[in-house]
Each structure stands twice: as structure tokens, then as C-alpha cells.
Image (spheres, rainbow, N blue to C red):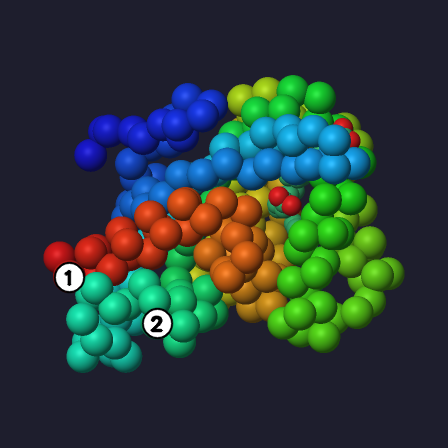
């Protein structure tokens, strides 16, 4: 369909579908507290998943669980993040003064923590060599769009304003990034809950 959904606080809107079959299942806000003094709204985000991939997972492994119980089923939520499901997290930058150095630091903190949690990957040099790919010349002013897309085969692909900037094949990295939005300590709890409710009702269609 051609509808879109707006994130409530910022008003930034997200198309109901992207690509052939990725459907919008939740929108939220990534905040950050600066020195514990003030909270800034960093970006609004939309969470998309491929309907066919989700239905396939549910049909194969969770067909006997009532939809109302799916969202609270830990194995199911883990599977959503670990299975070979095509997804996109679309970020729309709210904070107009974001520079690449801050993005690198934030990435090392948020994604870095998850890489250690899931992979025991405790290698700051490796993480730094990857974040070095975030080049200083990238500009991400307010309202820029960054797509973090998980392709088939656990390939993470990053695009800024529709321009592809890099891809990495890593199940661990895909899992770690999805955990920021869908895991147990997400950036936005409401967004996660809406996402899981919508996944469950999608699986019933
Ligand atoms: O200017 O130092 C500052 C505050 C910046 C906070 C940055 C948080 C960055 C979050 C990651 C953005 C990913 C696109
Ligand atoms: O919000 O802490 C966070 C992490 C978001 C993941 C950001 C990925 C950034 C992708 C590269 C951007 C290059 C400018
Ligand atoms: O091989 O599974 C592995 C470990 C992968 C670590 C990935 C580090 C982060 C890469 C960010 C690149 C974004 C374009």
C-alpha cells in the first residue's frame, strides 16, 4: 500500500512497505543522554521484515503456538533475530549536529557491547578497523535516511540516502544490530512491543 506511519514525537514518517515485501511493523525513537544531563533525540527508526520469511519461520517452528503468546515466547523472539529473515531498520536522523566521530563512538558502545555478548568478540582493534569504514566525508544532516538492511544469507548492507556504502556477511553482526531494537533491552520499548504484536498478527494472515 502507499500509506505511511509517523513516529509520534518527531513526526518523521516511514513508508508502509519498502522493496517487494518488507512491511513496516514498528516505529520508534533512539535517544541518548549526554553526560546524564540532557536527552537528545538522535534518530527515528522504522522496523521492517519480509512477510514471507516471517510466515515461513512461524509455519515451520511455531505453528502450534497461539498468536497471542508468540510475542512473549523467548525462543521465537530469538529466532526472529537469528533466522535468515530479510529485514530493514531505517534510521531518519533527527539530531542535526551528528558527526561521524560520534557515530563511530556510539556504534562501538552499542553494537560493540552486543558483539561481545553474543560472540565473545572482545577485540577492539577489529571493531575499530570496521568503524574506520565510516568515513569522515559522509554527511548525515537532519532528516538523512540510513538503511541497515539484512539480506538473505545474513549479509548486512548499509545505504545512506539510497547510496550503498558497504556490506558485511556476518550472522553475529546482524544479530547484534537487531538486538538493539528487538532484544530485551531495546532503544524503544513501545516500538519493540508493537513490532512483536504486528509480527504475530502477520503470521496469522
Ligand atoms: O554531539 O557528541 C555529540 C552527541 C552525539 C550523540 C550521538 C549518538 C549517536 C548515535 C548513533 C547514530 C547512528 C546513525
Ligand atoms: O544507534 O547506537 C546506535 C547504533 C546504530 C547502528 C548504526 C550503524 C551506522 C552505519 C554507518 C553509518 C555511516 C555514517
Ligand atoms: O565475523 O562474525 C564476524 C565478526 C564480525 C564483526 C563485525 C564488525 C562490525 C562491522 C560494521 C560494518 C558496517 C558496514
Q: Are marks 1 and 2 in contact (CB under 8 Å)?
A: no
Nearer to the camera, 60 or 155: 60
Q: Secondary structure at mark 1?
A: helix
Nearer to the camera, 167 or 41: 41
Q: Which mark is residue 73?
A: 2
Give the residue furthest to the right. 125
- The residues tagged by marks 1 and 2 sit, at their Cα atoms, a distance apart of 16 Å
**Beta carbon at label 2 within 8 Å of ligand 2:** no
Q: Would residue 52 be visible to someone looking at this image?
A: no
Going 56% across and 68% down the picture, which residue do you hit? 171
Give the residue furthest to the left. 205
At label 1, counting other C-alpha atoms closer than 10 Å, the crowd grade (few under 14, some 14-19, many 20 or more) is few
Relative to 19, 117 lies left or right: right
Whether 200 is drawn above or below 47: the answer is below
Q: Secondary structure at mark 2?
A: loop
Residue 166 is situated, as x and y percent measured from the top left of the image, at 63, 47
Q: Which mark is residue 204?
A: 1
Nearer to the camera, 51 or 67: 67
Going 62% across and 58% down the picture, which residue do you hit? 168
Q: Would residue 43 be visible to someone looking at this image?
A: yes
Amino acid at each position: 500500500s502507499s500509506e505511511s506511519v509517523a513516529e509520534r514525537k518527531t513526526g518523521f514518517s516511514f513508508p508502509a512497505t519498502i522493496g517487494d515485501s518488507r512491511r513496516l511493523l514498528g516505529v520508534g525513537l533512539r535517544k541518548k543522554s549526554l553526560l546524564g544531563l540532557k536527552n537528545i533525540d538522535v534518530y527515528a527508526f522504522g522496523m521492517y521484515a519480509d512477510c514471507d520469511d516471517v510466515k515461513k519461520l512461524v509455519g515451520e517452528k511455531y505453528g502450534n503456538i497461539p498468536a497471542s503468546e508468540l510475542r512473549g515466547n523467548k525462543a521465537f523472539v530469538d529466532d526472529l533475530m537469528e533466522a535468515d529473515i530479510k529485514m530493514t531498520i531505517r534510521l531518519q536522523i533527527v539530531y542535526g549536529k551528528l558527526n561521524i566521530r560520534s557515530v563511530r563512538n556510539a556504534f562501538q558502545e552499542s553494537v560493540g557491547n552486543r558483539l561481545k555478548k553474543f560472540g565473545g568478540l572482545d577485540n577492539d582493534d577489529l571493531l575499530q578497523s570496521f568503524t574506520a569504514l565510516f568515513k569522515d566525508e559522509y554527511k548525515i544532516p537532519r532528516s538523512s535516511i540510513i538503511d541497515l538492511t539484512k539480506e538473505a544469507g545474513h549479509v548486512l548492507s548499509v545505504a545512506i540516502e539510497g547510496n550503498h556504502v558497504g556490506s558485511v556477511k556476518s550472522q553475529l553482526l546482524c544479530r547484534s544490530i537487531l538486538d538493539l531494537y528487538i532484544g530485551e533491552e531495546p532503544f524503544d520499548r513501545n516500538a519493540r512491543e508493537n513490532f512483536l504484536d504486528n509480527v504475530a498478527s502477520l503470521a496469522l494472515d
